[in-house]
Image (tube, helix red, strand yellow):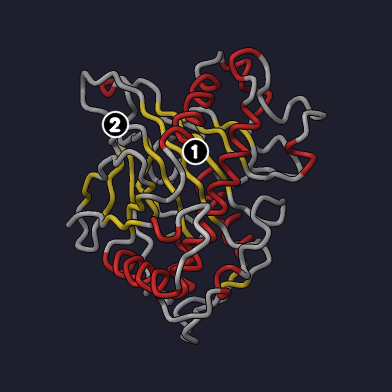
Amino acid sequence: MSIPVVDFGAYRLDEKGTTEEHLHELGKALKAAFTEVGFVFLKNSGITQEEVDRVMDISKKFFLQPEELKRPFCRSSFTNSPNHGWVSLETERLNPLRPGDLKEAFNTASLDPDIVTNTFEYKWPSSGDVAGFQEIQTSFFLRCRELSLRVLRVMALGLGLDPEVFLSAHRLIGTDENGTTLRSLYYPLVNSEKAKEGQLRCGEHSDYGSITLLFQSSEGLQVRTRSGEFICAPVIPGAVLINIADLMQRWTGDYLVSVLHRVLLPPVGDSSTRQSLAFFVQPDDAALITCYDGSNKYPPVTAGAYLTERFNDSYGRT
């Protein structure tokens, strides 16, 4: 089994002349990928490799700084947006049964004015090599937001639903009332022989929200198939890897599947680092997620409550 590749050129960013026929064709292709695999590569999305490289470059400059320069931006230190900021090595356990993940992250979780203005000097890295960090991260966030909304519209059409079904629950992306987050991820050098027993770069997990957009610098991601085996996800330059997340699986009564994925340690002797950008699309905090087919497979849950519960699992309960 392999991850399907779909050409999104007919509805790429900045494309305004799309026909309904093209949208329905794209919807069918996405439905097939998300019901059979849970993942799909989109090529010709409108987000260029140059845009991705720009974000990765400024992010890596941040991660390579001494820890004392990163510590002022720690996640959970900003009251109005507790998921915003830097996540240090081994802080997060995406599989709570394993030791902390061998990765760092910087979360852009809100574009509200009190986060994005430079009035608050500790919100964003801004000096030396990371000058421009805020503008580059927020600009990419907005590009991913627009692409995500296009994908959600096409998904609804593919399922035979009103295109507003999903869009109406994602109107507050970029505010403190929606948990959507752009994560710049950095996997530093690893001495596999010194890693803790069972430790991975990123433990097995499924994502929490609606869909996730992923951009990778190199291979390393593994996706579990419906038969239970893990396969390696290739890197396709210029393409975005999109997967279904948990709330979308609940929303569709298990019709679309949210599957486990992970990043293993590099082989012994492999001294390469790894980067990725993940745009985790979350419904608005107050959105009530119920099975759209009227089934009772899952109890109703608000997106905000579900996200908080999953954070408690991955960061440790207090």
133 horizontally vs 80: left or right: left
Up/down of 42 relative to 158, above or below: above
- Residue depicted at 29% across the width and 41% down the height: 236
Which quadrant of the structure image shows residue 169? bottom right
Give coordinates of residue 72: x percent, y percent.
68, 24
Question: What secondary structure is marked by label 2?
Answer: loop
Q: Residues within 10 Å of mark 1 (few under 14, many from 20)?
A: many
Q: Which of the marked residues, 1 or 2, is nearer the chain's N terminus? A: 1
Number of labels in the image equals 2
From the viewer's side, name the closer residue of 49 and 250.
Answer: 49
| Location of residue 99 by image quarter | top left
Q: Which quadrant is the N terminus positioned in?
A: bottom left
Q: Callout 2, which amino acid?
A: Leu
The three-letter code of the residue at mark 1 reads Glu
At label 2, counting other C-alpha atoms closer than 10 Å, the crowd grade (few under 14, some 14-19, many 20 or more) is many
Residue that sits furthest to the front in the current view? 17
Residue furthest to the bottom in view is 294
Q: CA distance from mark 1 to mark 2?
A: 16 Å
Residue 312 on image: x %, y %: 57, 50
- Residue marked by disc 1: 92
The residue tagged 2 is 265
